[in-house]
Amino acid sequence: MFNDRLAAQMAAYFLLRNRGRMSVLKLMKLLYLADRESMERYGYPISYDLMVSLDHGPVLSRTLNHINDSAPSSVDGWKDWIGDRAGYEVDLRKDKITLTDLDELSKADVSVLQAVWDKFGHMHKYDLSDYTHDECPEWQDPKGSSLPLRYKDVFQALGKSPEEAEELQAEIYSKQSVDDIFASL
């Protein structure tokens, strides 16, 4: 189930690596690539966010809504970690945040985030956008709109068979359903 505190801590991880500030485009690409990498390694995303294709490549939809201040923040959620969007950039809200403060992230999550940072952190935002166009075959040009990305499409782009991809997607949806039940109690 999507959790804006977890998504904020994913963003905070990358912002910490970039001295506390980053372009929205670059951050969105890194977050998408982290969920994609987690799916490749472990069979599930970190954020459980909705994935969509936009003109500049795939993004995590709910997270982008938080960046654009068009989604409510939970208690100790997005707004407590990530500052308001300033033009095309975001920054950390908290002053003395450290990696140990990112308690929503498992060791496996941090390993994925670090691997994504090591591979892509040096890249310019437009180079990352081009990378996701060229190297993420699940992305489809939405021609000025947005198109939903299914988890099974990502799994197939990562080399899983259609049957494996469907099964992995079903497992993700099943976990989300169980989480939704417990969240409503």
Image (cartoon, rainbow, N blue to C red):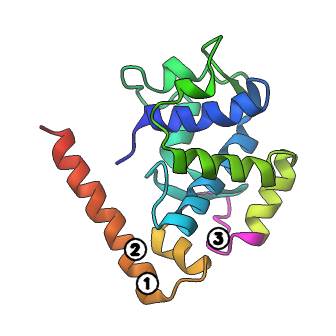
Residue drawn where x is 58% and y is 32% of the image: 67
| Residue 140 numbered mark, or none | 3
Q: Nearer the viewer, residue 101 or 126?
A: 101
- The magenta segment is 135-148
Does the magenta portion include 145? yes
Rendered location of residue 10, percent (x, y): 57, 38
Q: Say which element carries label 3.
A: loop
Secondary structure mostly seen in the magenta stretch:
loop
Q: In the rendered structure, does residue 167 fall within the stretch colored magenta?
A: no
**Mark 3 surroundings: few (<14), some (14-19) or many (≥20) residues within 10 A:** some
Q: Nearer the viewer, residue 7 or 43?
A: 43
Q: For label 2, count other residues whose C-alpha is less than 10 Å away and answer few (under 14), some (14-19) or many (20+).
A: some
Name the kind of residue labelled 2 in the image: Leu
Above or below 67: residue 76: above
Which label belongs to residue 164?
Answer: 1
Give the residue type at disc 1: Glu
On residue 104, which mark appears? Answer: none
- Does residue 70 lie above or below 58 as drawn? above
Q: Is residue 172 left or right of residue 4?
A: left
The residue closer to the viewer here, 183 or 73, is: 183
